[in-house]
Amino acid sequence: MIVVWLKRDLRIDDHAPLAEASALFALDGVPMIALYAFEPDVWSAPDADASHLAFVRECLAELDTRLRERGGRLVYRLGDMPEVLETLHAEEPLDAVLAHEETGNSATYARDIRVARWCRRRGVAFREFRQHGVLRPNPGRDGWAERWERHMRRPRLDAPERFLDVGESRVPAASLALADELADRCRLGPDTRAALRQRGGEREAVALLTSFLMERCPDYRETMGSPVRAWDTCSRLSPHLAWGSMGVRRAYQGARRRLEQLDRLGETDPRWANSIRSFLSRLSWHCHFIQKLEDEPDIETRCMARSCESLRDGLDPHTAAARLTAWQTGRTGYPMIDACMRALVATGWINFRMRAMLVSFASNHLWLDWRTFAPWLGRQFLDYEPGIHYPQVQMQSGTTGINTVRIYSPRKQVEDHDPRGEFIRRWVPELAAVPDEHLAEPHLMPELLQAMVGCTIGVDYPAPIVEHRTAYRHAQERIFGLRATAEARSEAQAVFVKHGSRKRTRGRR
Ligand SMILES: Cc1cc2nc3c(=O)[nH]c(=O)nc-3n(C[C@H](O)[C@H](O)[C@H](O)COP(=O)(O)OP(=O)(O)OC[C@H]3O[C@@H](n4cnc5c(N)ncnc54)[C@H](O)[C@@H]3O)c2cc1C
């Protein structure tokens, strides 16, 4: 019997382990089970959230139906791997475990090592297949983009037509309700985003890709930075790519086909092709970022540029805790920051630019060490993908040593992206009656006006937690002071060789 071990690959399309299991059945009549383990050691990590589990559950329910249509089914177990494998093996001897490679957090990394060791000890073959375009091992960053492109252009694996399941009497399926037991055991609490978050499953993913490529994408490139428009004009595929209800290759090939179709149809509006090309670049960024964590797992907890390790030491713990709470609850006194945080916490999503602004604000204005908030922030993202998250958080915190440091002016973000306050008024209702011209800095409203609009600063809405210009200057001096040192410069060179994108080398020099 072989086990197809499902993790962040909850689909039937373009799924190498499932395709292999189906081929082994066709060739040699080998039976299989498709296993999903609810693993307490993984789900009790500080970056795990009830909304993630709820999304996974939706993906699993659909996948089970699809497998059953083809003679298979999902088998659920609650427990840490490899104990789950040990019990299965005792009931029904296993010949092989097939799985996708996963570039995860330290909990899944340690778990994968344990599983490989268990397989070796028990003489069970363990085969891992590449998922997405992340290379293991990575021969180096030179030529990475070309290798990624080649992988994306290879034909996708069709959903297998038939499986031979080992049978309920030999290995009972157990129930998806084990997820509730897991949630209790890991104290995940309720899914507080249930009403407003995206839904899981392959069907939902395909519908999003289709509506994006056929209808929604023309304004993508121009509006992806807008917290008002991005909700509809971005693809919104991220949770599906993160939990695997769609593979990157499917999105890539769909976008390429659409480009060719637009060309054939003689589309004259350049926004279509420009947007699809931007989308294709972002699909490669997906893997480009995950590759960083794959190549250096330590960057989940250590600065990519080690010279930045103690950059933000020294803030007294009470101040740090108060600032962190204000940021997490959307009460910093900066309306764009607060609106973005509240929208993210409620829905599990915010667009790239606003994520970057939130992290930059926490790191530069509030001078918080990224490690104090990165796992919490990961819990808020329904699309939490450790390999994108940690390198992005570090990039926005200025601790990679190689990326441009961006410190956003919260005022300018309002003027550029929400001048009429649509977004801010929706998520910060205390400011609903504040006139447009005061929305960016409501604390500057005269007291009489505050009383007239029913928003007294310090009572109904907080005064700014830090002063923008002072915080900006402090962050600049500290970061650029550090970057100017000889140690930081030579370190930056090494970070670039290991992790840097080769596309814009000239600009960087
Ligand atoms: C601090 C910070 C943390 C982030 N954490 C995550 C995370 O945990 N998971 C995650 O999927 N994205 C993360 N991102 C990247 C980006 O914000 C999201 O991928 C994007 O907003 C998802 O929306 P979408 O699917 O509509 O994106 P689209 O713009 O439609 O892009 C399509 C896909 O390309 C990939 N992608 C897009 N932008 C980026 C980017 N800048 N870097 C890497 N891949 C990208 C994603 O897989 C995305 O689904 C983070 C960004 C920042 C600044």
Image (cartoon, helix red, strand yellow):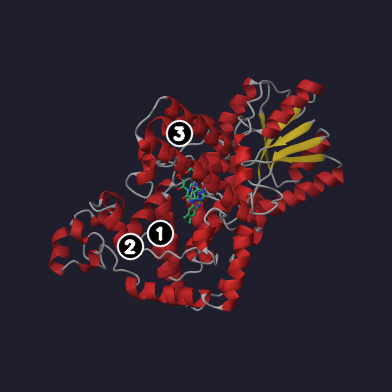
Q: Amino acid at mark 2?
A: Pro
Q: Earlier in the sequence, mark 2 or mark 3?
A: 3
Compute the Cα span from label 2 to label 1.
8 Å
Q: Could you classify mark 3 by the number of other residues whose Cα lies within 10 Å: few (under 14), some (14-19), or many (20 or more)?
A: some
Q: Residue at x 73, y 30 (%)?
A: 20
Residue 187 visible in rendering: no
The residue identified by callout 2 is: 410
The residue identified by callout 3 is: 208
* Callout 2: SS: helix
Q: Amino acid at mark 3?
A: Leu
* Callout 1: SS: helix
Q: Residue at x 80, y 30 (%)?
A: 1
- In the displayed structure image, the side of residue 133 where residue 252 appears, left or right: left
Q: Residue furthest front?
A: 506
Compute the Cα span from label 2 to label 3.
31 Å
Q: Position of residue 60 (x, y in %)?
A: 59, 34
The residue identified by callout 1 is: 357
| For residue 41, above or below residue 64 | below
Along the line of sight, the residue nearer the viewer: 188 or 345 = 345
Q: Earlier in the sequence, mark 2 or mark 1?
A: 1
Compute the Cα span from label 1 to label 3.
26 Å
Q: Earlier in the sequence, mark 1 or mark 3?
A: 3
Q: Position of residue 38 (x, y in %)?
A: 64, 43
